[in-house]
Image (cartoon, helix red, strand yellow):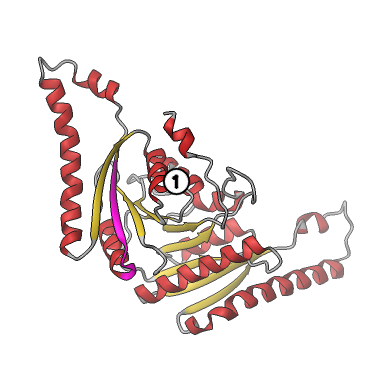
Amino acid sequence: MKRFKNILVVSNPEGVSDPLVARAQWLAQANGARLTLLDVSETNQSDLARMLSTLSGQRGREVGADLLAARKDQLEQVAAGLRGNGAQVSTVLAQGVGFIEVIRHVLTHDHDLVLKAADQTPTWNVLGGPDLHLLRKCPCPVWILNSKAEPRYKRIMAAVDPDPDDETRNALNHKVMQLATSLSVQDDAKLDVLNAWYLYEEHLLRSSRVHTPPEEIEALLLRTKQESRARLTALTHQYTEFSDRMQVMHIKGVAADVIAQHAHEQHIDTLVMGTLGRTGLSGMFIGNTADTILSRVTCSVLAVKPEGFISPVTIEELETH
């Protein structure tokens, strides 16, 4: 985890949760990193003015200023605790759209990690809109902590899709493995490295319209499985020093289904995954498989982008708002 040196810690509307503070503290110590605590007020000045317009005289203006000061004080209280434990911490109070302000700070201050607690409710605990916006559009790695996340994890999953012939994908898989193995050591956690495979259009090959002999289908299945397994072995063989805590899993099925099911059934604490959409294009977006996974899992997620990712949100666009 030594790669993160300039971490942006994002407050939720209800404040900075204890698990978020604990993880930020751990990262600062493990990496020698500096932390920036960011709170974004999404109530714009005109909305605030209307809300306070019924108050007489200067009272409305005073209450508005007090509200912002209270949020700033909350950040400073959290920062003081972190500083007391040796962390280098600054605080920022911004106004605007939450995820846009986060990306603004990443782009202008070269943050190399965004750390945030998930926006969740008691009845809906999958990742929601603002979190998905960050995971899709933020250029640096984004770590969304489940509201129930403990300061240290017990079960970690690395979702990989190795392809040595695809340089971008191969580099992204190594990013995932490096982060997942490092995190498993730091937290003394078990690590599941999972790769899903399937035979493309198997259901059509088995249909009466295509008339593929069963023995040919079985041969295709065997070859697909063997080739996929060989790619997975080539990747994980470079991380054998972690074999005492690492379980490599090669499971037949659609990746989004397999990963989400495994995360749920095995009570995974955090999922480390790459997000790969169109490559080499300005403003490329998260891949469909990753998007489906993110909309279905309830565990914490550490998502990393491929080298060369360009956010669809740009500084120029931000400056126009």
Q: Check disc 1: other Cα within 10 Å, few if <14, some if 14-19, many if 20+.
A: many
Res. 53 in view = yes
Disc 1 residue type (three-letter): Leu
Horizontal side of 275 relative to 143 (left or right) equals right
Q: x, y (%) of residue 98? A: 37, 39
| Left or right of residue 282, residue 297 in this image | left
Residue 18 visible: no
Residue located beneath label 1 in the image: 134
What span is colored magenta in the figure?
Answer: 30-39
Q: Nearer the viewer, residue 131 or 78?
A: 78
Relative image position of residue 288 (x, y in whole percent): 61, 49
Q: Quadrant of residue 33?
A: bottom left
Q: Quadrant of the N terminus?
A: bottom left
User: What residue is shown at x 44% (from left), y 28% (from top)?
Assistant: 320
Q: Quadrant of the C terminus?
A: top left
Question: Image point 86% across, 54% down: which residue?
Answer: 208
Compared to residue 283, the image places residue 33 above or below, namely below
Residue 187 coordinates in the image, percent (x, y): 35, 73
Q: Is residue 243 left or right of residue 255?
A: left
Q: Quadrant of residue 231?
A: bottom right
| 95 to the left or right of 279 | left
The reply to whether the magenta stretch includes residue 37 is yes
> Residue 224 at what x, y percent from top left?
75, 69
Look at 80% across and 54% down and name the residue there: 204
Name the dominant secondary structure of the magenta segment: strand
Up-down relation of residue 285 to residue 95 (above or below): below
> Relative to 218, does residue 66 appear above or below in the rendering?
above
Residue 130 position (above or below residue 53): below
Corner quadrant of residue 94: top left
* Residue 51 lies in the magenta-colored region: no
> What secondary structure is found at the residue carrying circle 1?
helix
- The residue at the point 56 percent across, 76 percent down is 248
